[in-house]
Image (tube, rainbow, N blue to C red):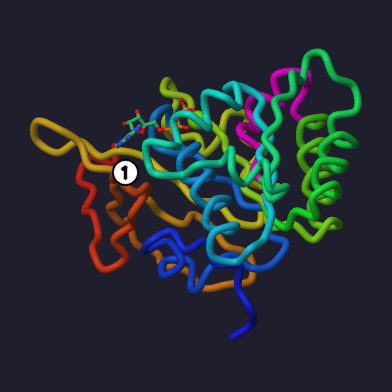
Amino acid sequence: MEERVKTNIPGLDEILNGGFMPSDLVLLTGPAGTGKTIMACQYLYNSIRFFNSPGVFISFEERPEDVKKHMTNFGWYFDKYEEEGMMTFVKYDPLHIEDIFGLIENNIHEIGAKRVVIDSITGLGLNIKNTSDLRASIFNIGRMLKRSGCTSILTSEIPTENPKMLSTFGVEEHVADDVIVLYRVPREASFVRAIYVWKMRGSMHSEKIHPYNITKKGIVVYPKDEIKVFNTG
Ligand SMILES: Nc1ncnc2c1ncn2[C@@H]1O[C@H](COP(=O)(O)OP(=O)(O)OP(=O)(O)O)[C@@H](O)[C@H]1O
Ligand SMILES: [Mg+2]
């Protein structure tokens, strides 16, 4: 099997047939509070911890200080990695910056990052008026990331009012190579967290809906278990 970019997130590589393919553009999508930011940070943290490979986290919404602080709950101390030049956290305001792509490209080249997270593409898209421009924009960002040899996660929101959509604008999933969906399934008095791989270009992957948890050590996916969904209407 060709080399894969391993996330080392417990259980995730198994449902991805070994990990992402190098230079893939991955859309990580789901409603609010499903753990997209946590999973994206875990991807970068593991990259440094296990593979000594630097990463860049681009935020369009949350302040980097807040994200980093939340991640210490899982024992992930990004400040240390930032000081060592292994990690860059940046926040951009898409409404006030012209050349975001150029800036991101600089962030990547400065530390030689091979893994990038953009959290979220919804934030970036707010500045772009129509769908075809947005599609072109995401395509261009994807092309830049691939050209830089990066395997990247773009997060996207599934609107609560329209849970059948895969993303906010309905174009993100077409541009991405891979799509991973996080959501929740109601069960009696609570809900279970569910993950599935919607698509993965050029690769086999699990076709099942798997449970996952957000634990003290971050996200854990259960590749041997599956979730039965009854109310699909
Ligand atoms: N220390 C923790 N232990 C267990 N679960 C946690 C912990 N911290 C947060 N969570 C869970 O993770 C959720 C937040 O995760 P995260 O911020 O990654 O979601 P998100 O999908 O990025 O949401 P949004 O779309 O609002 O950005 C919380 O709602 C909570 O359920
Ligand atoms: Mg988030």
**Vertical position of residue 48 compared to residue 2: above or below:** above
**Vertical position of residue 199 compared to residue 51: above or below:** above
The CB of the residue at mark 1 lies under 8 Å from ligand 1? yes
Q: How many marks?
A: 1
Report the span colored magenta. 117-131
Percent across and percent down for residue 34 are: 38, 35
**Vertical position of residue 11 compared to residue 214: above or below:** below
Measuring 46% from the left and 44% from the top, which residue is drawn there? 76
The secondary element bearing badge 1 is classed as strand
Question: Dividing the picture into quarters, in which one does residue 184 lie?
Answer: top left
Q: Residue lying furthest bottom in this view? A: 1
Q: Any magenta on residue 120?
A: yes
Q: Which residue is mark 1?
A: 214
Q: Nearer the viewer, residue 40 or 186?
A: 40
**108 sits left or right of 28 in the view:** right
Q: Nearer the viewer, residue 174 or 66?
A: 66
